Amino acid sequence: MRDLKNPAERHPEKARRPDAPQPKKPAWIRVRAPGGEGYRDTHRVIREHGLATVCEEAGCPNVGECWSHGHATMMIMGEICTRGCSFCNVATGRPDALDVFEPGRVADAVQKLGLRHVVITSVDRDDLADGGAEHFAQTIRAVRHRAPETTIEVLTPDFLKCGAGAVETVVAARPDVFNHNLETVPGLYPEVRPGARYFHSLRLLQRVKEIDPAMFTKSGIMVGLGEDRQAVHQVMDDLRAADVDFLTIGQYLQPTPKHHGVDRFVTPEEFAAYERAAYGKGFLMVSATPLTRSSYHAGEDFARLRTAREARLAQG
């Protein structure tokens, strides 16, 4: 049995990598340690339902704040990913078989937590013919049945090794937001996201809009990996060409010495400049701060996203 708390067993593909220095975090990137009654209540519901969260598995710095308010991002299809991206703290290896009861447990947890908006993500499942698309669809339908007032955001893998029908299966289940992260600029894909293809991910987001033009689409990148400003602006242009509505930009934080090193800490002023530029390029919604993550304040941001679309439509 693998011990996923042991970094060597959690990331066997990184064991031979040289350690990358971990620079001290600046004051603007520090967060409080998790705790409090709300945090403990969320932790209890997640554990009682045997669920995984990306909050824990990816080592999100915002877990304390989000869980204290009862917000958790559900990670379906297990805790083990078939990819080994150099930035990611999710365990890599051969996943277990899908749990057919998981969609129901997710829906029950969403109801018990009283979530008005839920984000559902997953590991990459290149071992499955459809990449887990039907499991996503079943989870969406289960949440709709159990918590019909809850809005649903999915953060999907790229379905790179699947047939063309995978994205159609997820869209047909009618999530309110379809999110797929580009993660970084195209020039860094070979070292940061080697199992993925930049233009395939762009095409995935574009295809969602072709199937359902009314569905909100969302994507995000990390900065501080070694990209330059021009490359970030090019990603913005590419996403707008794919008609993506919502962009998130956050600071990359190195999970362990074996992961990709932090090139630099981007200042809050630079994040503000990215936000202004992105709005200027036509995004309906932008979140660009050092601690921004795909699911951070997702419910509040979804409400603002809907309001922004209504305002734009009213302008004609």
Image: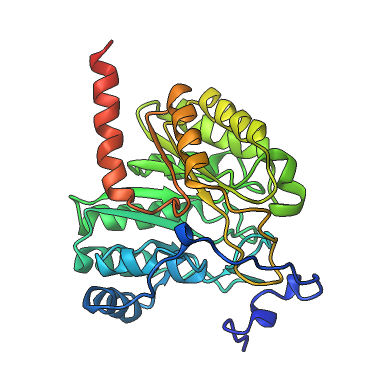
Residue occupying the far top of the picture: 316
Q: Is residue 82 left or right of residue 136?
A: right
Residue occupying the far front of the picture: 27
Residue at figure coordinates x 36%, y 75% from the top left: 34
The image position of residue 283, as x and y in percent, is: 42, 28
Q: Nearer the viewer, residue 162 or 182?
A: 182
Q: Is residue 230 above or below residue 131?
A: above
Residue at figure coordinates x 66%, y 51% from the top left: 225
Q: Is residue 85 left or right of residue 155?
A: right
Q: Is residue 290 above or below residue 171?
A: below
Residue at figure coordinates x 49%, y 28% from the top left: 277
Q: How is the image coloured?
A: rainbow
In the picture, which quadrant includes the C terminus? top left
Q: Nearer the viewer, residue 151 or 233?
A: 233
Q: Is residue 64 left or right of residue 292?
A: left
The image position of residue 32, as x and y in percent, is: 38, 71
Q: Is residue 152 left or right of residue 220?
A: left
Q: Nearer the viewer, residue 155 or 253?
A: 253
Q: Is residue 282 visible?
A: no
Q: Is residue 277 visible?
A: yes
Q: Is residue 35 above or below residue 292?
A: below
In the picture, which quadrant includes the N terminus? bottom right
The image position of residue 85, as x and y in percent, is: 67, 59
Which of the 4 image quadrants contains residue 7? Answer: bottom right
Q: Is residue 42 above or below residue 165?
A: below
Residue occupying the far bottom of the picture: 1
